[in-house]
Structure formats: structure tokens, C-alpha cells
Amino acid sequence: MARKATSQDVADRAGVSRSAVSFVFNGRADGNIAKDKQLLILAAAEELNYTPNAVARSLQSQRTHTIGVVTDAIAGGPFAGKLLQGASSAAFDAGYLLFAIDTQRNDVREDNAFGTLINRQVDAVMFAAESLRPHRPHPAMQGIPALLANSFDPAGAVLSIIPDEIGGGRRAAQILLDAGHTSIVYLSGGPELVATERRTQGFDAAIAAAGLPSITALETGWEINDGYAAAMRLLSDDGGRSPKLDRPTGVVCANDRVAVGFMLACGQLGLRIPQDLSIVGYDDDEPLARTVVPGLTTVALPHREMGEKAIELLLAELDHGAASQSGGTILIPCPVVMRGSVAAPLDGVR
């Protein structure tokens, strides 16, 4: 078996000192090692298939190059997995590993999870939630770089990274307004989620800015059958046998599952999407929103972006001595994903 290349081998190949190699692979080369020497070292390392000794680097830097993540139900649930994907990729690119523990919403497990991570001497920690909600930071988050993702500290003491749900609600309404719709229905989901009130606030702001009368949100729930039932109530006469003549031309749905239920009801009533009715969802629920026919126009939750931003901020504090974030909130925009479920209303119908 061939011997694994060492930093001395790289130094000999590049014609530099061993300390110069250490500077390059510890991220301290700029200002200490000339650029041409850095390139020689990197080329030599590639030729020799050299990888730094992670244990030695940890001893030198007094870090473990690990970041701990505690989640409520992300790993075991169907949503928000992209948050962990984004965080893991960003950490890996920076030479860090992510230790993630899913607590299945169990307080005892959460307490044990933080204890386990601290005992393993992780360099930073974060708590990530499946759905936006308040969360009281664990005491272990004190004295170490820490933040909350997709959740927020009610006391405001720990930095929180959350989706801009107010902006998302505004964008959902604006999609229909920009297409020329003025007869719009809003299905708001249930009040048990923090996001509901915020999305409604944004929706209302867009409607008011357009100079239209306020629209009362209709509470529907969050599942496909909830959207189907709401559509049959709103759109049909004769017990669901025919569509109403005074139906709306556009609808903003609580989430993509509700939107799909609404679309199924439209099909049963003989209504075409988007010719007769335009539909906007929320969440960009894969693969549902992408594979339904027509494809569902929706507002995406920025899960991956939240994970990436969380790692960026934690690493900034660790690697560059950035001032510790002592609370506050960072809002990540919710992007619009245009597909085929929205069009201008038919002539003479708004």
C-alpha cells in the first residue's frame, strides 16, 4: 500500500518550508505566503493527493471543526429537509462537519441532544424547526456561537434566521394582481401556525396597495381534502354539479396541498386552469407543485437558504472574529416560482 503523502512531502515538491504548507491549509496564507508560492503548494498537494490531517488541525486551532444542529422534526418529517442540506453543504465546503440530532419534538431528547453536542466539543450550535415557530433557546447555547433557524427567540436574545412570511404573502397576492385579477379569494389555512398571520398580513398589504377592497381570509386547513372542500363550497351550485357564474377568477391557497385539492375540484366542475381560474400555492412542495398539471405557481420557503445563511454567520464568528450576534432577526426572502397555473383573466372578467 502506498504511503500517504505528508505536509513535508508537499513542501519538498513545492520547494517551500513545511510551515508555508501549514499556512496554506490552515487558511492563513494571505499576507504570509506569496501568491505564486501558494499556487505551487496547491499544485503539489493535488499531484500527491495530499489531504490535511483533520485531527492535527483541530489540535492546532483548538477546534473540532464540527457544528451541532438540534431539530424538532426535520429529519423525520417530509418538510424543511433542504435546511439541513443547505447547512451541511455550506459547512462541508468550509471544512466542517455537521452533527444533526432530531428530537421528534421531545423536550427530554432536546435537552440530551444539546448536552451530547457540547460534550463532543462542537464549535457552534443551532436549533432548527420544521415549521416557523417561537422557541426558547437551550441554556447550552450560551457562551458558544449559536443561533435559531426557522424559529425565533421570544425574548429576542438569540439571533434568529426565518423566512419573510409577510413578504411571501404579499408576493402570492401580487402574482394574481400583476396578471390582472381583481376578484380574488384567499384560503388562509389554520391559526395554529405562526406563518398564517404573517402571510395574511402580507396578502392584505398587497390588496390594499392595489386599491382593492379588503378580502376576508377563509380558514381552510392545510391538506388536499381541505382545498377540495373549500373549492366545492366556493365554486359550485346544485350541490357540486355545476360551477357558479359569479365565481372568483383567482385564488391564493394556504399551501400547495390545499392548492392541489382546489385544482381537483375545478376539474370535477369542468373549470379549466388557468383559463377559467388562476391558482397560487405556497411552499413549493416537491414534487407536488412541480408535477401537477398544469404546474403550480407558488411561493417557495427558503429552507436551503436559511441553512446556508446560518452556517455563514456561525463561521464568520468562528473564523474571522466577527462580533457575536446578540439577538435580532434576519429575514430570508420567499421567492416566487412561476409555472402554469396563473394567466390573465378572460376578457370582461376580472
Image (cartoon, rainbow, N blue to C red):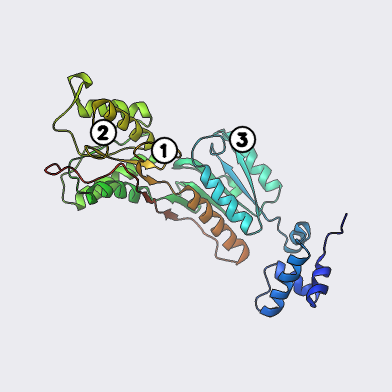
| Mark 2 residue element | loop
Query: Which residue sits at x=38%, y=51%?
Result: 335
> What x and y, as percent, mark residue 348?
11, 43
> What x and y, as percent, mark residue 190?
34, 33
| Mark 3 residue element | helix
Residue 291 numbered tag: 1
- Crowding near pointer 3: few (<14 within 10 Å), some, many (20+)? some
Q: Is residue 239 left or right of residue 192?
A: left
Residue 31 numbered tag: none
**Kind of residue at disc 2:** Leu
- Of 62 and 252, the residue lying toward us: 252
Q: Is residue 238 left or right of residue 8?
A: left
* C-alpha gap between disc 2 and disc 3: 37 Å
Say which residue label 3 marks. Answer: 109
Q: Is residue 25 left or right of residue 296?
A: right
Q: Are marks 2 and 1 in contact (CB under 8 Å)?
A: no
Sequence-wise, the earlier of marks 2 and 3 is 3
| Mark 1 residue element | helix
Say which residue label 2 marks. Answer: 218
Occupied quadrant, residue 226? top left
- Crowding near pointer 1: few (<14 within 10 Å), some, many (20+)? few
Quarter of the image where the N terminus is located: bottom right
* C-alpha gap between disc 2 and disc 1: 26 Å
Looking at the picture, does residue 40 appear above or below residue 205?
below
